[in-house]
Image (spheres, coloured by chain):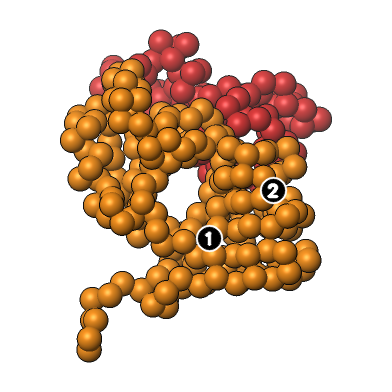
Amino acid sequence: MIINHPLLGPRDSQEFVYLGDAALIRRPDGMADGALDKFIDYTYLRDNPAGQHRELWYHEQGDRSWLVVTRNTVSHEITAVELARDVARTEGRSK
Amino acid sequence: MANALKALTPLGHDAPVSETIGPVTITENVGVALASLASRLGREAEVATVAQAAGIPLPGPGRAETASYGAIWLGPEQWMIEAPFETHEDIVAVLKPLFGEAASITEQTDAWVRFDLTATDLPALFERLCGHDLRRNGTGSATRTVIEHLGCYVVRRAENQVSVIGPRSSARSLHHALITAAKSAF
């Protein structure tokens, strides 16, 4: 499998480490009301779609960037690769 | 003990090792001081201005450049800076006053071993070593990839010259891998 790194171009998936659902970048605020329930959802509950899935990959043997990869879990076709930093920024978090 | 404090090279000898196998020459290079440079959040423009004034190139993704200093892109807003060991042994003391609080700078010289390889057909050698395709990545390309299970930087200095910068603590394993590939390729 080839992941088309947004900065470095096509790289072999052997260079990457898979983390899981891209929803993991939306960590709840631990100081807010109802934080416990939100953290239980955040820690344990995942969608497991047969089809399009957004997931986090880490370019461990490359530039060590975190990526959000949109991949079809049935065909393994990758339709989009973004820097996780850019995804977080477009959602109004980070700086 | 005449010279008890003389440093050993990464391969553990008094002098750097150089070996020629057919058209390939693999030379341990101990003449370069290294420091990593990372812009601090919001200070990127300031770092670019200071670097330009000091002759430090800041190449884009997957590239390496040389001006007064050499530089290799490591990641977004991160570079490895190279300078001659003779004049810049304490490279952080030289760079820190330039950048002040705008960048984080860390001494890297003794963390790495650098092998310089020259050969007429380097792609034939590197296709046996790593997934980085030198046929598509010409002079000035630089990337981190895996060689012999080790995270190494592969820097193409010229058409027939490549530097492999790998972890110093695994210098002999990396050297063995390079020698084996050279014997296999030519």
Most foreground residue, A46 or B30: B30
Considering every residue shown, the one lying at the far bottom of the view is B1
From what the image shows, is residue A48 above or below residue B84? above
Which mark identifies residue B131?
2
Q: Residue furthest right?
A: A75
Q: Residues within 10 Å of mark 2 (few under 14, many from 20)?
A: some
Q: Position of residue A32 (x, y in %)?
A: 28, 18
Which chain is home to disc 2? B
Chain shown in orange: B
Residue A92, image x and y in percent? Answer: 41, 10
First of labels 2, 1 by sequence position: 1
Q: Quadrant of residue A95?
A: top left
Depth order, front residue of B11/A75: B11
**Residue B11 placement, left or right of A51:** left
Q: Decide if residue A53 is in sight here.
A: no
Residue B20 visible here:
yes
Horizontal and vertical percent position of residue A10: 69, 33
Split into 4 quadrants, where in the image is the C terminus of chain B? Answer: bottom right
Mark in front: 2 vs 1: 1
Q: Which residue is mark 1?
A: B115
Please tell me which residue is depicted at 53% across the width and 49% down the height of the picture: B153
Chain letter for the red part: A
Q: Is residue B46 left or right of residue B24?
A: left
Which amino acid is tagged 2? Gly
Q: What secondary structure is found at the residue carrying circle 1?
A: strand
How many numbered discs?
2
Mark 1: few, some, or many residues within 10 Å (few <14, many ≥20)?
many
Q: Are marks 2 and 1 in contact (CB under 8 Å)?
A: no
Q: Chain of mark 1?
A: B
